[in-house]
Image (spheres, rainbow, N blue to C red):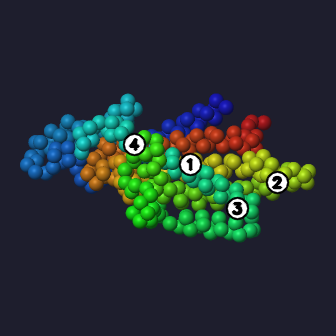
Amino acid sequence: MIVAIGRRLAGIVATLLASSFVIFAAVYAAPGDPAVFLAGGRDKLTPDRLAEVRAQYHLDEPMVVQYGRWLWDCLHLDLGRSLKYSDQVSDLLASRLPTTLALVGYATVLFVLLGVGAGVLAAVRRGTWIDSAVVGGTTLAASVPSFVGGIALVAVFGVRLGWFPVSGSGSGFAGTVHHLTLPATAMALGALAVVSRVTRQAMVDAGTADHVAVARAAGLPERHIVRRHVLRNALGPIVTMCGLVTAGMLAGTVAIETVFGLSGIGSLLVGAINSHDFPVAQAVLLLMVTSYIVVTSVVDLVHPVLDPRLKAVRSPV
C-alpha cells in the first residue's frame, strides 16, 4: 500500500512538473516580446530601457533558468504581478475563483442528478418508449455545443420570458443560484448526456450478473434489486465518469463565462491572453491543470472503494 501510494504521488508530481513546463514554454514562445509590454509599449522605447527591463525581470537569462525561478515562486505561492491590473495574480485568482467553483458545482449537481436519474430510468425501462426518449434526448443534448445552448437559453428564458438574469453572478446564496441557473444548465447539458449514457450501459451490464438473476428468482422486489444489486455494482464507472466530467468543467468554463458575462477564471484567462498578461495566463492555466489532475487522482483513489472486485484484483496475493 505504501509503495502504491508513493508511486501515485510520484506520478502526480511528475505530471504537474511536465505540465508546468509546457505552460511556461507555451507562454514564453507566444508572439510578442514580454519586455516590450513590461516597458509600457514601443512608444519612446530605447535599447537601454529594453535592456534594463530584461535584466530587471530576468528575461535575459535562458528559458530553463526563468522556468526554475517561476516554479520556485509558484511553490511559495508567489504567482507574480499582473501586467494589466498591476495587482498580485494570487489576489486576482482569489477574487475570481469562487464564481467559477460555484458555476462548476451547480452544473455538477444538475448533471449528476438528472444524468444518473435518466440513465437509471432508461435502463430499468429498457426497450420501451421511455428508453427511446432518454436516448434520443441525450443524443440531441450531446450534439449541441455549450455556448450554443447558452445563447438559446439566454434568448428564451432570459430575454423572451425574463425568468433569469443573463449576466452577473449575483450575491448571497439565493441570488447566486438565480444568476447561475442558465449558465450551469448550459454547461450541464452535454455532461448530462454523457453521464446518462454511461449510467444506462453500466446498469444494463450490472443487471446481467448471476447474483441479480438469483435475487429475481428468490422473489425479491424489483426496486430492491435495482437499488441494492444493480445500481450499487454500477457505481464504479458512473462515479468515474462524473469525476472526469467535473474535472473537465474546471478547465472548460471559458465559453460559458464569456456568453453570460461572468467574472470567473475562464474570462480572466481570455482577458489575459488578449492583453498579453503573461503572469495571469500562466497562473490560470497552471490552476486549471492542477485542478484536473487532483480531481482525476481522487476519482482513481475512490474507484476501488466503490468496486470491491477491482480492489480484490489490485490486492497482492
Q: Label 4: how many residues lie within 10 Å, few (<14), some (14-19) or many (20+)?
A: few
**Closer to the N terminus: mark 4 or mark 3?**
3
Q: Which mark is residue 109?
A: 1
Q: Which mark is residue 222?
A: 2
Q: CA distance from mark 4 to mark 1?
A: 20 Å
Residue at horizontal 68%, vertical 69%? 132
Q: Nearer the viewer, mark 4 or mark 1?
A: 4
Q: Is residue 27 left or right of residue 307?
A: left
Q: Which mark is residue 122?
A: 3
Q: Amino acid at mark 1?
A: Val
Q: Amino acid at mark 2?
A: Glu
* Callout 4–callout 3 Cβ contact below 8 Å: no
* Callout 2–callout 4 Cβ contact below 8 Å: no
Q: Label 1: how many residues lie within 10 Å, few (<14), some (14-19) or many (20+)?
A: some
Q: CA distance from mark 2 to mark 1?
A: 27 Å
Q: State the residue in front, 154 or 54.
A: 154
Q: State the residue in front, 19 or 296.
A: 296
Q: CA distance from mark 3 to mark 1?
A: 20 Å
**Closer to the N terminus: mark 3 or mark 1?**
1
